[in-house]
Amino acid sequence: MSVSPIAVSIGDPAGIGPEVLAKAWVRRAQDRLRPFFAIGDPRSISTVWKGPLRKVDGPAEAAACFDEALPIMEVEDAGEIVPGQPNMPGARCAIASLEIAVGVAREGAACAIVTGPVSKAELYAIGFTHSGQTEFVAERCGVSPGNVAMMLAGPTLRTVCITTHVPLARVSELLSVELVVSRARVTARGLQRDFGIADPRIAIAGFNPHAGEGGALGREEIDILLPAIEQLRDEGIDIVGPLAADTMFHPRARARYDAALCTYHDQALIPLKTLHFDEGVNMTLGLPIVRVAPDHGTAFEIAGKGLAEPGATIAAIRMASEAAERRASAG
């Protein structure tokens, strides 16, 4: 491999993150996965998996032993680990794991990071002030939240959120020409840099039903989206819209763009998860490092039962590897 291994923060020790990561390692040869290593409390994995684990001090050591055992950099004690029962020590361990993953990626020892699912309720209970891991990673990388974008990606669809984890009632007031332009620029650059698409095509979804019906169902398209689209076209970005969201995700429509820019969280995630529930991933665009995550939560209800599917984690590791390779090739 031409670049370093991938760092994987396990996420909440009581969730399915440890299990799906172990299953991904089992399928390392079958799915031709780049070497990766876990970061977290080793007991979170050994509690749900009896395969070979090896504690390592850093990425180089992890790459050397990857074929024989799942490498793990040990982080602080996560307290009592019971699958399906999150607690505050586990939340602290999850954040410490994420912090270390970002650090090794920023120093170049890891080529990318994949972040496991966390429980926001537990994180907020220990004083976590970010709306999600995306915002935390952006801050640690010194990037303004307005200059990153959350992309959800599967084999046949990529969507990007203009607004993310905010109440639906606030979306209209948060939308602005500046925000739309910023998200579109980040998306275009990300498609070029991380996906190798030289001339990306972007479609933007309308906020209102039927994209506002010329103002009859709302003016967000007229007052915000159309001016933003005009500015982006003047900058040379290939963007169309605003399109009626209910007709832009069928197969023929998806063939006409490389990414759909969506005005709010569920507008982006519902079609992605409907099409690619077991293989969808979340990539943060606009960072100096590659950050990808499986697009699912902690699934506490099935943790420890051997039922978790590793497809999304495998897809995240593969996408992180491909993006890292492209960045390394570009120099």
Image (tube, grey):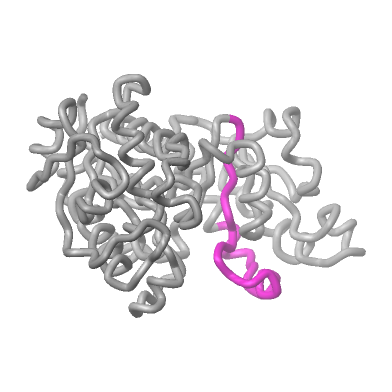
Q: Position of residue 214 (x, y in %)?
A: 89, 58
Is 16 above or below relative to 79? above
Relative image position of residue 220 (x, y in whole percent): 76, 65
Instruction: Name the quadrant containing residue 260.
Output: top right
Instruction: Give the residues drawn in magenta, as a range.
Output: 156-181
In the figure, is residue 200 to the left or right of 325?
right
Residue 123: image location, x then y, percent: 38, 71
Q: Nearer the viewer, residue 146 or 155?
A: 155
In terms of depth relative to the viewer, which is nearer, 153 or 187? 153
* Residue 116 seen in the current view: yes
Name the quarter where the C terminus is drawn: top left
Outermost residue, right side: 216
Picture mark count:
0
Q: Is residue 171 magenta?
A: yes
In the picture, measured across the screen, residue 124 lies left or right of residue 271, that is left
Seen from the viewer's position, the closer of residues 40 and 205 is: 40
Q: Is residue 324 magenta?
A: no
On screen, residue 80 versus residue 287, left or right, reads left
Q: Where's the N terminus, which quadrant?
A: top left
In percent of the image, x 74 and y 59: which residue is there? 207
Q: Residue at x 26, y 33 (%)?
A: 328
Please state which of residues 244 and 180 is positioned toward the viewer in this rendering. Answer: 244
Q: Is residue 134 visible?
A: no
Say which residue appears at 40% left-offset and 64% top-offset. 85
Residue 253 position, x and y percent, is: 74, 33
Q: Is 142 displayed left or right of 277 in the figure?
A: left
Q: Residue at x 56, y 47 (%)?
A: 235
